[in-house]
Image (cartoon, rainbow, N blue to C red):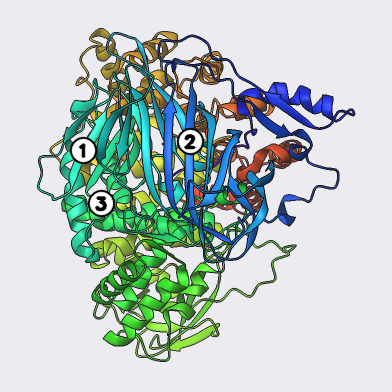
Amino acid sequence: MGKCEKKGCHLSRCCCFLHILYLFFTTGAAGFFALAFLYKNNAEMAPYTLTETVYFNINDNIPKEGTPMKEDIDYRLPEALKPFHYTLKLQPLIYGNRSVLGSVSIDFEVKAPASNITLHIASIITKNETVKVVPSDNPLGPEIPITRQYYDPIRQFYIAELGSELENGKNYSISMEYEAYLSDELRGFYLSTYQSETGEDRYLAVTQFEPTDARRAFPCFDEPAMKARFDVYLGRSESMSSISNMPLLETLPLEGQEGWYWDHFYLSEPMSTYLVALVVSDFDYIESPYGTDVLFRVWARHEAINQSDYALRKGPEVLSYYEKYFGVPYPLPKQDMIAVGDFAAGAMENWGLIVYRETAILLDPKVASARNKQRVMEVIAHELAHQWFGNLVTPVWWTDIWLNEGFANFMENYGSDHCEPTWKIMEQLIVDDIQNVFAMDSLESSHPISIPVSNPEEIGQIFDDISYDKGSSIIRMMNSFLTEPTFMKAINWYLSTYAYKNADQDDLWDAMTRTAHEDGTLPRDMTVKEVMDTWTLQMGYPVINVTRSIDGTSAILTQERFLLVKNENSSDTHDYMWWVPLTYTSQDAPDFTSTQTVWMTDKEKEISIESLPAQDKWVIFNLQQIGYYRVNYDENNWNLLIQQLQTDHEVIHLTNRAQIIDDALDLARAGHLSYNTALSVNSYLGNETEYVPWTAALTNMDYLESMFTRSGGYGALKNYLLDMLIPLYDSVGFDDDLGDPHLEQFKRVSAVSWVCNLGYEDCVTNSVNLYKAWMQNPTNHSIISPNQKRSVFCTAIANGGEEEWNFAFDQYQNSNFATEKDFLLSGMACSRELWILTRYLDLTFTEGSPIKRQDAARVYSDIARNEVGRDLAWDYMREQFAKVYSFFTSFSQLGDSISAVTEGFNTQMELQELIAFKDEHLDDLGQATRSVDQSIERVFTNIEWMNNYYDVIIQWLNDHGYPSRFKR
C-alpha cells in the first residue's frame, strides 16, 4: 500500500535556490520574496506564460532556534473546520516541463469559531494573490480578508490568517490556484514511464496518495476523517485519456488551448483525500464481459492489455461475492483497475480506480507461474475488499489502519478461496499469514496492532506485517469464537451503520458484541472489546504451556509472552496477559472441526482442564491454528505426537501438522523445548505429501541454514537437509506439469529451489541445460516452464559467468512480460562473481538505468540474500548510503533492504557495525527506524542462538549420522 518517503521541500524544484535564499535572509535580510517562473516552449505546453508572483515570508519557512522536537509537535489539523466539497482542476504537463497547473476550491463547515484556515500542502507553489475566502452561500459577495499567509514545513501546513472570524455553524469556501510537479518519487501525482513497441519512451501521470501524499497534488485537509465529495476536472491533450474515481461526465475544450480538453467526472461519494485517484495516459482498456451491474474495466499499455483476461474474469466475480458476503451493494457505478509500470506498493485501493503494479494484475500463461497467478488473485481480492473496508467505512485516524489492512487481508483469503477453491487458500494462510507474522511479533521491538501515531514518518512505519497479517489472524480468531453467521451479521451492521463515515476499533467491537449477544454466541457478561483489546492494544502473543497430570486426565495451562530471547535488561515492565480462546482435541476421539471454546482470561496466568484421556493418548490444543498463540506440551505429550506423526500422520489435521512443526522448532529456538524433540518432529516428513506442513518445516530449516552458512559445521547440516529433501524432489520430479494440482506445483517449486540451492547435481544440471536451450532460442519463452523460471534462472546464472548474466539482462530489457522481468531481476542477483554483482548494484542505482526505481530495493535485497553478495551489499549500503537511499521509493523499502542484508548476521562484530550504521544515519532513517531496531534485535537473538545452540545442533547431527569436526 502507499507508504511515505523522506520529506520533500515546499518548493521541491527550487530546493537549491531556497538554500541560497536561506543563507541570504539569515544573514540579515528580511521580508518577502517574489518568485516568478517562465515556461520553456514545448509541444504540450499551455499557450501562455506563467508570470504570476508568489509571495513567501522566508522567515516563516525557517525553523527557529529552539524548534520543538517532532514528538512534541501536534501534527493534527485544527478541528474547527470540516470540509464537505472539493472542486479540483489539474492539468499535468506530461510532455512539457512536468508541472501540474492546478486550482482548488474547498467548501467547509465551521465547527468552532476560527480566525485562520489550515490546510496541508507539500511540494506545492501556492499563488497567494489568487487565494479567496468567501461564504459558500454568497461566493460573489464580500471576501473574508486574509492578513497573512505562511507555510509550516515541519507539519506541512499552509496557514491563512484572517481579518475576521469565521462564524460557528456557517459554511465557507477557500479557493486558490497553485502549481505542483510530476515527481519521480512514486508518490503524490507522479510521472511513470514505459517503452512502446517501437522503443519510444512514453509517459503517464498517476497518483499514489496513501497515507499522506494527497497534499503533494492539491491543498487539502489531508486526514482520513476529513471526508468530502470531490468534483474533479483533469486537463489532457487530445492524444491521451484520463480516469478518476467516478465515471466521465463530460469532455470540454480547454479554453485558449487548442488540442487540450477538460475531462469532467461525476461528483464522488464522500471519501478521504488519500483515496482520490487521477490518471492521465495513452493506455488502452478492455471492459469485462462477465456478469455484473458495475462497469468493470482493466487499463494497461497497448502492448500488455491482452494480459488482462484473468483480472477481467476474477475481478467481477470477487466483487459480486463480497456484495453477498457483506450484504452491502458495491457503492459506485464503475470499477477501473489499471496496471502501471512504476508503482511503489503492490496496489492501491483508490475508490473506483485501483492502481496496480503490472506484476499484480497482468498474466500471460506462457510466462506466469502458479505463484504469479495466485498473487494476482489475492491482490485483486485484497484491493476489492478495501472498497468496503477503508473506502466505504474509513478509520478515524491511522492508529486503526489495521481495520483497513487486517480486514482486507482476511477477506482476500475468502475472496480468493471462492474464486479458486482448489488452491486451498485457507490452508496456506497458516504459513503465509500466521506463522509469517509470528516472527516479527516475537521481538521486543514489535508493536501493538493499534498504536498511536502522529507524523507521516510514524504513520508509514505501521504499514507492516503486524497491521496486515496479525490483523488478519486475530480477525480469523474472532470469526471462529463468534461463529461465521454472527460475524457476517455484525459486519453487515457495521458497514451499514458507518457507511460514508469514519469508525474506530471500538465501533467494530460494539457491532460484534451487540450481534453476538443477540445471537447467543457470546455470554452476556463478556464483550468483544475486553477480549480483543488484549490482542490489539499490547504487542506480542502468548505461548500456552500444557502440563498434564501423571495419569493424563487433567492439565494445567499457563500463559506467558513468547519471545525469541528474553532480555534481562529490558525496560518493558508491562504484564502481558491475553484472553485466549482455547480449543483442543485428543487421540481417543480426534475432531479438528470442534468450535467449543474454553476461555483463559487476561486475569488468569493458570487454569485447569479436566476430562482429558489417559496419559498414553495425546492432546492437541489450538485446532487448525485458529488461535493466535503457540502451544508447548510436556515431554510425554510431545513424544506421543511424534509417535503419531511417524505411524499415521494423517490422523492429525494438516494445518495442525504445520502448527506442531513450527511451534516445536521456534520453541526450541527460544529455549522452551529441546532441539532433540523439535528435530524429531521432522523425522516423519519422508511420508508427508502436503505442501503446507512442508513449508512450515522448510521455513524453519531456512533459519538453521542461514546460521550455519559461514560455519565449519555447514557441510553436516547440508547433508542432513539433502537427505530430507531428495526424497521430496524425487517424488515431485524436476520436470514441471502445469496440469498438476495447484499446491502440487507449489511443492515442486519448493523442492527444486531447495535442492538446486544446496547444489544437488541432478537439479543443477537440468537447470543449466534448460537455460542453455533458451539461450540458443531466445524468442521461445515456453522452453522453461513458468513455475521453474525463478529457480532455473538463479541456478544457471550462479553456475555460469558473464555470458549467462548478459543474456538475462538482454532478455530483461526486451521482455514485454512483467512477471518474466521479475524472475530475471531475481536470477541476475544469483551470480557468484563479485564484479558482476558490483556492476549490477551500480546499474540498479544509476539514473536512467533500464531497472526501474520501484525495483531497486528488491534487486538490493536479492543480492544481499546471496551468500556471495551479502558483504558486498552491506559495504555498498554503508559506503554509498545517500545514493542508495535516494533510489528507494519508500522508507519501508529501506527497512526491508537493511533487514535482508543483516538477517544472517550472527557475530558481535556485525552487530556493532549495524549499531554504528544506525547511529550514523539516525536522522535519515525516518520511517525505517523501527525496521532497523528490529534488525538489531534479530542480530542479537542470532548471536544468542549461536552461543546457546550451534554446538547442540552439531551434536544432534553427529548423533544422527552427519558428523562434523567443527565446533565453536
Q: Which residue is mark 2?
A: 103
Q: Amino acid at mark 1?
A: Arg
* Separation (CA) of disc 2 from disc 1: 29 Å
Name the spot of residue 274 as percent of width and height, x first. 45, 47
Image vertical order of residue 504 relative to residue 587, above or below: above
Q: Nearer the viewer, residue 345 or 335?
A: 335
| Front: mark 3 or 2 | 2
Within 10 Å of disc 2 (Cα), the crowding (few <14, some 14-19, many 20+) is: many
The answer for how far apart the CA atoms under marks 3 and 2 are is 26 Å
Whether pointer 2 and pointer 1 mark residues with C-beta atoms closer than 8 Å, the reply is no
Provide the residue designation for mark 1.
Answer: 297
Image position of 687 (left or right of 454): left
The residue mark sitting in front, 1 or 3, is 3
Three-letter code, disc 3: Leu
User: Label 2 is placed on what type of residue?
Assistant: Ser
| Residue at 26%, 38% in the rendered image | 248
**Front-most of 837 and 693?**
837
Give coordinates of residue 151: x percent, y percent: 68, 41
Q: Nearer the viewer, mark 2 or mark 1?
A: 2
Q: Earlier in the sequence, mark 3 or mark 2?
A: 2
- 281 shown above or below 150: above
Quadrant of res 418: bottom left
Residue drawn at x 37%, y 67% as measured from the top left: 498
Crowding at dot 3, Cα within 10 Å, few <14 / some 14-19 / many 20+, comes out as some
Residue 259 lies left or right of residue 874; in this view the side is: left
Looking at the image, tell me whether mark 1 or mark 3 is earlier in sequence order.
Answer: 1
Residue 62 x, y percent position in the rendering? 77, 37
**Closer-to-camera residue (404/107):** 107
Q: Secondary structure at mark 3?
A: loop
Q: Which residue is mark 3?
A: 332
